[in-house]
Image (cartoon, rainbow, N blue to C red):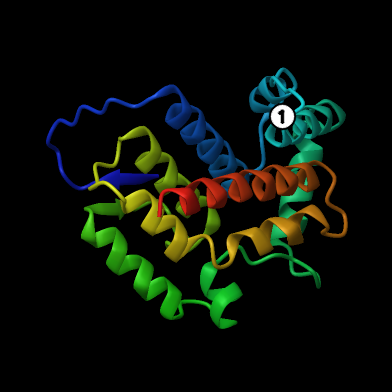
Amino acid sequence: MPESVSQESFTSNVGEIDRARAQEYALLATLLSRSPDSLLLSRLADIRDDASPIGVAHSAIREAAVRVNEEGAAREYFALFAGLREGSLLPYSSHYLAETLYGRPLARLREALQGFGVEIAPERSEPEDHAAILCEVMAGLADGSIPAPAGTEREFFQQHLSPWIRRLFIDLEHAEGAEFYSAVGLLGRTFVDIEAEAFSRTA
């Protein structure tokens, strides 16, 4: 979990929309870092939806959570992200942008994280450009738990997520064998499209 290096107290006047955004990022971070357990699946089975694009994606997540159990979700997650079969996904910006791992996109990201005092908890073995970690950082910027100057959130999204993460979610949405995680891909794609449009308006 990303943690702020600074121990200073920080009070943020976070609005309802930013809290909702942070929750979406946190959910995506969780589902990209591990398969959902029974408790999370039961919560997702009760998620609210509406006729908006994000509401439709929530509906798909709810329906997928009802259909799958913890063991099935774990098998699907392993096949998609940890398996050795052809078609397994590598959810790293370096892979999508430089066709390698531990590439220049990771180096640029580390510089950015150092710039506003964020370090990755030592128990995390994944490099920082893993999609789950990037979503965790965005959640922290959205809810104010990672203090940063105005405009940092938009800049971070546009530099480190926007160039590639939509393609990851599309790949996940259409991955062979993806059922529950196809709905996760739909949620991610829909949400980052909304974020990209919102940030373009504030540029």
Name the outermost residue toward the left: 8
Q: Is residue 120 visible?
A: no
Q: Residue at x 38, y 24 (%)?
A: 15
Q: Quadrant of residue 179?
A: top right
| Residue at (34, 27) in percent of width and height | 14
Residue 121: percent from the left, percent from the top? 34, 49
Q: Amino acid at mark 1?
A: Gly
Read off the residue under disc 1. Answer: 55
Q: Position of residue 69 (x, y in %)?
A: 80, 31
Q: Is residue 121 left or right of residue 53?
A: left
Q: Nearer the viewer, residue 161 or 91?
A: 161
Quarter assignment of residue 37 = top right
Q: Which structural element holds mark 1? A: helix
Residue, x 35% and y 42% (percent of image)?
Answer: 141
Q: Is residue 99 left or right of residue 82?
A: left
| Quadrant (top left, top right, bottom left, bottom right) of the N terminus | top left
Q: Residues within 10 Å of mark 1 (few under 14, many from 20)?
A: some
**In this rendering, would 184 be left or right of 149?**
right
Q: Quadrant of the C terminus?
A: bottom left
Q: Write down the quadrant of residue 49 in the picture.
A: top right
